[in-house]
Image (cartoon, rainbow, N blue to C red):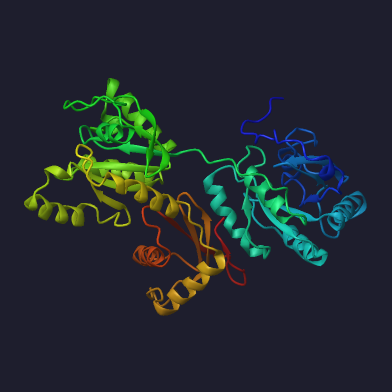
Amino acid sequence: MNEPTGWVGWDTPEPDVEEATAPQPVVAVVGRPNVGKSTLVNRLIGRRQAVVEDVPGVTRDRVPYDAQWNGRQFAVVDTGGWEPDAKDRAAAIAAQAESAITTADVVLFVVDAVVGATDVDEAAVKMLRRSAKPVILVANKADNSSIEMEASALWSLGLGEPYPISALHGRGAGELLDLILDRLPEAPKIVEDRPRGPRRVALVGRPNVGKSSLLNRFSGEIRAVVDAVAGTTVDPVDSLVEIGGEAWQLVDTAGLRKRVGQASGTEYYASLRTASAIEAAEVAVVLLDASEVISEQDQRILSMVTNTGRALVIAFNKWDLVDADRRYYLDREIERELRRIPWAIRLNLSAKTGRAVDKLAPALRRALASWETRVPTAQLNAWLTALVQATPHPVRGGRAPKILFATQAGAAPPRFVLFTTGPLDAGYQRFVERKLREEFGFEGTPIEISVRPRKKLGPGGRGKAHG
């Protein structure tokens, strides 16, 4: 069988002899049957060694495997499915899992992110608490961002933050391995971090707004063809340039004239390549011609960037052509046309003369820092509690929904989930987003807020969030 794609590289250097002879830390992988423990073990050790089948109960004994990550060696122990009050062979399998926990330094408790917390999972949590071992809650089978967001509901197990991962496809594998090393009793061997590659910046805008001129300004040479005829650039042009003392990967894209679905021929494929360049970038600089009215196509391009969740800097180019009258009308256009993205960082510059181009690097750094921001759950909920107490949700039909708690489901861009007793008014949700930005910043990045109302189970039933 072919290996699934996306395997994390385990080509780490061999450890020192002295370190190799020291006792290896032990990581036990436990959970109820068929949550993907053996698949996760194979992912952690970097090879297909633990037997995997799509039926529960394949693993029965506790089986140790050697693993390496970032120059450190440790053992990963695969276990059979744990169940409470098990009988006969199932009881022996559960006993093996409990033995693995007693000898482990860190326990990975694996839960199916698609199914959510079950009664067996809750019973396992009680057993894990009695062991007093450090536990990492792993939400497996989070194969896409939608399921990853659903995994936030596993906070209810009381084991802290759930870490979404797809053991099958490799999502989150590297981050989980880093976390394991961080939780092991001995500090990992110090390895210098590899320098991060240049941040990717997409230069986007309609034709002839000066994207190629800006790229050439930073590169100090003609890296992209510039012509007064609109639409000169067709293929995205990648250039490694230095801005503000830092290397950046700038991608000059084709000018977008119309919706992708309405374009044809060369323009159609250029539009697709531009859309792909935005997807591959971390931050987009949308150039607008400051000397012209903000157009419908400018609006569509801004929507394309925000819909892909990229950090955003709006650069009003050709500022050398703007007089006092134009500034007056431009201020009113910004107030009217850009009111839905007041969080975007705005710059006034001129690629032709070099005016204010030195302000672009600080703006990019601010946008990216916001894009990657994570708010600790405790801090988020303390702030939210105070906000809701000061301004509760309006009463509708004699009742007002309550926000039970919130969590940040991800970053780049920041994504938040509100767990509530019922649906929130759209206006109140916008109010929460506005206050969230006021409190924590998020300048230059979109943020996503989703609401998870508690499901009503009928008389006498206990509500749960929608799954």
245 sits to left or right of 12: left
Quadrant of res 350: top left
User: In the displayed structure, would residue 347 be above or below residue 463?
Assistant: above
Question: Which residue appears at 9% of the width and 50% of the height?
Answer: 326
Q: Position of residue 247 (x, y in %)?
A: 43, 39
Kindly tell me whether residue 59 is visible in this rendering.
no
Residue at horizontal 53 percent and vertical 41 percent from the top:
196
Image quarter of the C terminus? bottom right
Quarter placement of the N terminus: top right
Between residue 264 and residue 281, name the one nearer to us.
Answer: 281
Left or right of 71, for residue 315 = left
On the image, the x and y values in percent for residue 17 come to 83, 40
Looking at the picture, does residue 43 appear above or below residue 126? above
Q: Which quadrant of the view contains residue 182?
A: bottom right
Q: Position of residue 150 (x, y in %)?
A: 56, 53
Depth check: give the residue in front, 3 or 321: 321
